[in-house]
Image: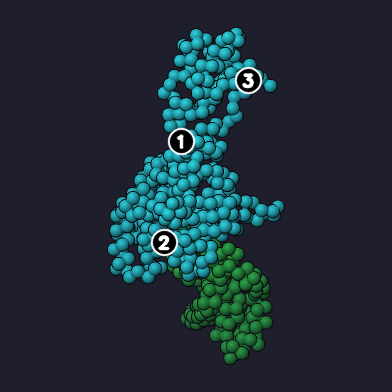
Chain colours: A cyan, B green
Amino acid sequence: MDCNAEKFDQGDLPIKNGERKAPQIEILHLRKVYPIPEGEVVALDNISLSINKGDIYGIIGMSGAGKSTLIRCLNRLDHPSDGQIFIDGKNILAMNALELRATRRRMAMIFQQFNLLTQKTVAKNVRYPLEIAGVPKKQANDRVLELLRLVGLEQKANAYPSQLSGGQKQRVAIARALAGDPEMLLCDEATSALDPMTTQSILDLLQEINHRLGITVVLITHEMAVIRQICNRVAILDGGKLAEKGTVDEVFLHTKSAAGKRLFGILPEKEDPQPTESALRIVFDGESVEQPIISRVVRECGVDVNILSANINQFNHKAYGQMLISLPDQLEERNLLTNSLRKLGLSVEEVHPE
Amino acid sequence: MNWNQLGGLLWEALGETVYMTLWASLIAYAIGLPLGVLLVVTRKDHIMSHPTLNAVLGVVINFLRSIPFIIMLALLFPVTRAVMGSAIGTKSVIFPLVISAFPYIARMVEGSLEEVDHGIIEAALSMGSSNSQLIFKVLLPEAIPSLINGAAISITTILAYTALASAAGGGGLGALAIIKGLNIRKFDVMYSASLLLVALVQIITVFGTRLTRGLDHKRR
């Protein structure tokens, strides 16, 4: 487990042994505070992240963790209070209006509420980025058709957004985002307003875009499933702070932070069970669920076990949580039980009611 | 007075009313529309954030709006004479009409633009829109149904102002109703001119509402 600790940060170093290219998006010590009458609220506190070209980078956190603020700082829809953001090595916070517009065209964004132009047809929505970039009409119209085909909505070209379902609206938004040939796509809770099946199809589409077009995707979400399904790297935000970051596999298998465990459903939201009588507390910390631990111990020790309470979650075929069993009366049985449980790698302690 | 004479008077007055209303509306919109846009985009944290300018515009507009039209008519006499060549008459009344109406229109436009979802503005910004692209390709087109609705209300307000034009020697249905009706107890003239005004307001309102609904693709 420890040997992995080092690996966590590898992808986040801008240069490693001269091999790794500079990251496409590099966030350094980002801080954002909102003034309120009583002082200020710290929305983001010392966030540093590196996102490489071709990544599908997930930023996850509970609501209020600051993830939306973070992604909105990337294209300066929000202004950070302190820190730096480099897009391909250029500090976006130091850019003038013209440079900012040029950079924004390279990093498109989609939103939870889709934000389509309500008075324009689907085709005109998708054409908007081309229009403002001065692409000739004929060429723009061809591109619009091509994009609508990509998102499977060529039939809806002349419909208005109000006539579409949520999933269709997000597809239009994606087509519009892709119109200007961006290198990066920022997704601000893009699937949070959608039902599970529609979410699935939008995630598939994002993945396809990433694979086929090589577009870097940065997405924020509060749903673990979204991260597991399409992201290769993940950062966990908790109360404006970076709780954890790394590849999705690493963070999943060796969750270190409490915020991460909570998000993955490993750490129960409710309190750990408290004993009402003297008991043994058995802590499951990622033991395989394939082994019938309790029944095996019972058989081996020949001691009856009375389960008082348990709060155990399964995740990735591993068990996390706690179980209280009543304390055997005889010391001998107690030690036998404790030892065989410990041998299986569980931590065991005697607890007494307060 | 026979029906022919009455008809002639009404027809002439109707023409004057339409003339005053149309020109005053057009010119007042030419001033009020950009001002309304400015009132929105110079707000704090909007695309051309300028709180001081915004506050100054707000105060000036509120000041102008709080002066009743009939007082404005009198106050502006010297200015009207300088600008229009004469302080009295149907044509000259257009000037005080414009001065009274444009602050009202600016507020109406401001209200319409306010209704545009901020998310849409952010989406347009995220695509790299310039300020002018944002105003002309997003903000105004998105607000069109509401702007048309506002225009119908503004025009009926201006129409109501024109009824007081007689105070400055102007013509129109209002002047007809007051001078050739009420003042000399010709109630048939007063009522028919008033009814025609009511009909005009109805027509503008119904037309405005229809147009608003027809153009709005947001609510289906």
Disc nearer the start of the sequence (1/3): 1
Tell me if A331 is positioned left or right of A217 in this view: right
Distance (Cα) linking label 3 and label 2: 59 Å
Disc nearer the start of the sequence (2/1): 2
The residue nearer to you, when weighing A35 against A153, is A35
Residue with the mark numbered 2? A106
Picture coordinates of residue A233, whole percent (x, y): 44, 46
Residue depicted at 54% across the width and 16% down the height: A339
Q: Amino acid at mark 3?
A: Val
The residue most toward the bottom is B85
Which quarter of the rendering shows the C terminus of chain A?
top right
Rendering quarter of residue A108:
bottom left
Q: Give a yes or no on whether discs 2 and 1 share a subunit.
A: yes
Helix, strand or loop under label 1: helix
Picture coordinates of residue B126, whole percent (x, y): 46, 61
Question: Vertically, is B68 above or below A331?
Answer: below
Residue with the mark numbered 1? A253
Q: Amino acid at mark 1?
A: Leu
Helix, strand or loop under label 3: strand
